[in-house]
Amino acid sequence: MANVDDELAQALRESEQAAQAEPAPVAVPVAPAATPPKRKGSAGFLVALLVMGGAIVTLIFTTFEGTYSRKVEEVANERQKLAGRNVRVEGTLKRCTLVRRDEPCEYRFTMAGGGAELPVRYARCTVPDTFQDVPGMVVDVTAEGTLDSSGHLEASTIMAKCPSKYEMKERAKKGEQAPHLDPFANKPCL
């Protein structure tokens, strides 16, 4: 075993001599881990998205302003406020006011509702089949267009409500005729 002790002592002396011959290692400062650069564009991108989103919402609300349905009496009471704006008006066709002109092709009629009346001009040659002045029949009408300063509606769209088949069965029992069955059977206004 003495041999092992001698060998260990010899190895220790050799390592000390080697350590004295070589310079001691110098600690080199290590730079801290590099942090990723901040993205300057991400905040700008977020702001741009928010501005575009706000613009789209504003556009939607201002485009559709005034296009929801209003009753004839509402439009009559707010003529000055609504002049020059797009409106959708609901009412009934006033009996004996529907007139058609061939040159230039147009329809003129009066809508009524709530004790108020609204003159309408529709510069088209065709109207829905159910849009007829039938004696004894109430024709519900929705007209969409621009209200001029004098209070006339320049309609671009006319829609006439067609009674349901169940409603027409009840009306037929009372002797009424469907408005779209015979367009030429309308009796003249007296």
Image (spheres, helix red, strand yellow):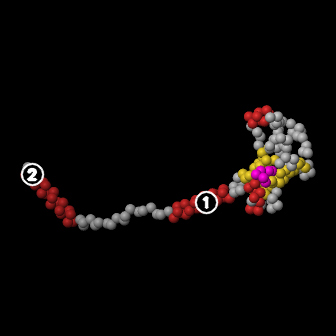
Residue 77 image-quadrant placement: bottom right
Q: Magenta region, mostly helix, strand or loop?
A: strand
In the rendered image, the quadrant that contains the C terminus is top right
Q: Secondary structure at mark 1?
A: helix
Earlier along the polypeptide chain: callout 1 or callout 2? 2
Q: Residues within 10 Å of mark 1 (few under 14, many from 20)?
A: few
- Against 47, residue 142 (above or below) is above
Marks 1 and 2, how far apart in space? 90 Å
State the residue at coordinates (50%, 62%).
Answer: 39
Residue 177 placed where, x, y %? 83, 36
Reading the image, the residue beneath label 1 is 54
State the residue at coordinates (76%, 34%).
Answer: 170
Q: Nearer the viewer, residue 177 or 2?
A: 177
Residue 90 placed where, x, y %? 75, 49
Q: Nearer the viewer, mark 1 or mark 2?
A: 1
Residue 86 placed where, x, y %? 75, 56
As drawn, the label of residue 105 is: none
Residue extending farthest left: 2
Which residues are drawn in magenta?
111-116
User: Is residue 156 in view from this perspective?
Assistant: no
**Residue 36 relative to residue 113: left or right:** left
Reading the image, the residue beneath label 2 is 3
State the residue at coordinates (83%, 45%).
Answer: 127
